[in-house]
């Protein structure tokens, strides 16, 4: 039995009846023996780069991993505290919170909120993912560096504004009143539908607070806020395309659109797939802050999402709802990564 195991990395000499280790195996063993020493020397050599990682590691530990301990709240009963009245000593509740939101008394609230979350997230993916790619292709066609830089700064700017400011600007532009004192965008919309009674009613009360138009306006403001900043990754991939590929396409008589189709897009396809997988992973992570700021009784049927509903519950059921949301997101990213790896041989891991 020992011989069968050793034959994989030792050479048996039948004449002497002894085993010897090949030179290649000795090198591998020596490398493995000094592995951590080599890693330590590499870290010491580039310690400045690793020091720059510390803030990000700290952020992830404090805001991503440490809060996971609160997930236990989904399995505890907040209504009957433990012996000391401490939340840490609350009675174990099992999966009752999950059953309550799935098929119990809170199901009528959870499933409509989950539906709204999925619809808004799907619209964000459908319209929000291609737009940064289109912007990156557009930036690549601008020959003047000054013009391109100016346009990029203007498009990136909304990303650096807080959600409260972006929401306030959107509300001001879409403001309406019964006196016809509309915001700039609301006034423009009214010109396109002067005989549209539902649209007029929505403009008077504030079009953002009408459930019929909430999702569309939410997606548009998301595009305005994030599309420019998200295009940075794709633009970096586009400018990395070899100029010889363009020259070869031009010699073959390819125009601008054909160059984009047959040269640029295939060259950045791996980046597109990776970003799509990451986008799918956050599919159900609809921005809580903006929805909360725009939520009202008028648009409740369209704006109530899992995050806002969980916040209103604020107990074990709320944690269970958010946990369900995140678990579905994890399943989606694993599924998308698996499909991508098998279909295109590109994956995150």
Image (cartoon, helix red, strand yellow):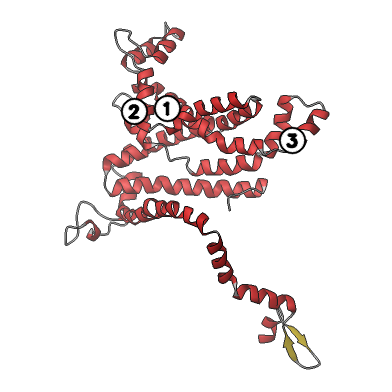
x%, y% of residue 306? Answer: 36, 39
Q: Nearer the viewer, residue 60 or 333?
A: 60
Whether residue 263 sits left or right of residue 54 in the image: it is right
Between disc 3 and disc 2, whose residue precedes? 3
Q: What residue is rendered at 61% in x and 47% in y?
A: 339
**Residue linked to disc 1:** 218
Quadrant of residue 312 within the rendered picture: top left
Q: CA distance from mark 3 to mark 2?
A: 47 Å
Q: Is residue 315 left or right of residue 331?
A: left
Choose the circle earlier in sequence order: 1 or 2.
1
- Identify which residue, 127 or 117, lies in the foreground: 127
Residue occupying image coordinates x 37% and y 45%: 322
Q: Earlier in the sequence, mark 3 or mark 1?
A: 1
Residue 329 vs 303, above or below: the answer is: below
Point out residue 252 in the picture as x, y percentages from the top left corner. 83, 29
Residue placed under numbered mark 2 in the picture? 294
- Residue toward you, 110 or 262: 262
Q: Is residue 172 above or below residue 233?
A: above
Residue ID at (55%, 70%) = 36
Dots 1 and 2: beta carbons under 8 Å?
yes
Other-residue count near label 2 (Cα within 10 Å), few / some / many at <14 / 14–19 / ≥20? some
Tell me if residue 262 comes above or below residue 333 in the rendering: above
- Kindly indicate whether the residue at mark 1 contacts the one at mark 3 (C-beta within 8 angstroms): no
Cα–Cα gap, marks 1 and 2: 9 Å
Secondary structure of residue under mark 3: helix
Secondary structure state at the residue bearing disc 2: helix
Residue at 56% over, 29% down: 131
Label 3 vs label 2, nearer the camera? 3
């Amino acid at each position: 039995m020992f011989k069968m195991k050793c034959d994989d990395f030792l050479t048996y000499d039948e004449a002497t009846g002894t085993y010897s280790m090949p030179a290649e195996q000795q090198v591998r063993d020596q490398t493995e023996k000094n592995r951590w020493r080599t890693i330590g020397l590499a870290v010491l050599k580039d310690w400045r780069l690793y020091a720059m990682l510390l803030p990000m590691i700290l952020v992830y530990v404090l805001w991503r991993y440490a809060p996971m301990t609160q997930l236990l709240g989904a399995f505890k009963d907040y209504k009957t505290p433990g012996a000391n009245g401490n939340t840490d000593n609350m009675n174990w509740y099992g999966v009752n919170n999950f059953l309550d939101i799935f098929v119990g008394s809170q199901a009528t609230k959870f499933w409509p909120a989950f539906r709204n979350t999925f619809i808004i997230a799907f619209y964000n993916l459908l319209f929000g993912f291609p737009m940064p790619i289109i912007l990156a292709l557009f930036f690549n066609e601008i020959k003047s560096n000054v013009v391109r830089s100016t346009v990029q700064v203007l498009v990136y700017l909304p990303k650096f504004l807080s959600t409260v400011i972006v929401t306030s600007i959107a509300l001001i532009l879409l403001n309406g009143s019964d006196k016809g004192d509309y915001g700039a965008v609301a006034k423009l919309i009214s010109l396109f539908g002067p005989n549209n009674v539902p649209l007029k009613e929505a403009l008077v009360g504030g079009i953002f607070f009408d459930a019929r138009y909430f999702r569309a306006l939410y997606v548009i403001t998301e595009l305005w806020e994030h599309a420019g900043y998200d295009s940075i990754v794709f633009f970096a991939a586009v400018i990395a395309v070899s100029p010889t590929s363009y020259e070869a396409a031009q010699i073959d008589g390819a125009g601008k659109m054909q160059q984009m189709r047959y040269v640029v897009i295939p060259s950045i396809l791996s980046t597109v797939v990776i970003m799509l997988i990451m986008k799918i992973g956050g599919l159900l992570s609809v921005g809580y802050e903006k929805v909360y700021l725009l939520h009202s009784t008028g648009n409740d049927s369209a704006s109530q999402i899992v995050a806002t509903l969980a916040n209103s519950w604020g107990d074990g059921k709320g944690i269970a709802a958010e946990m369900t949301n995140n678990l579905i997101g994890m399943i989606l990213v694993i599924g998308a990564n698996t499909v991508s790896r098998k279909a295109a041989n590109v994956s995150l891991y």
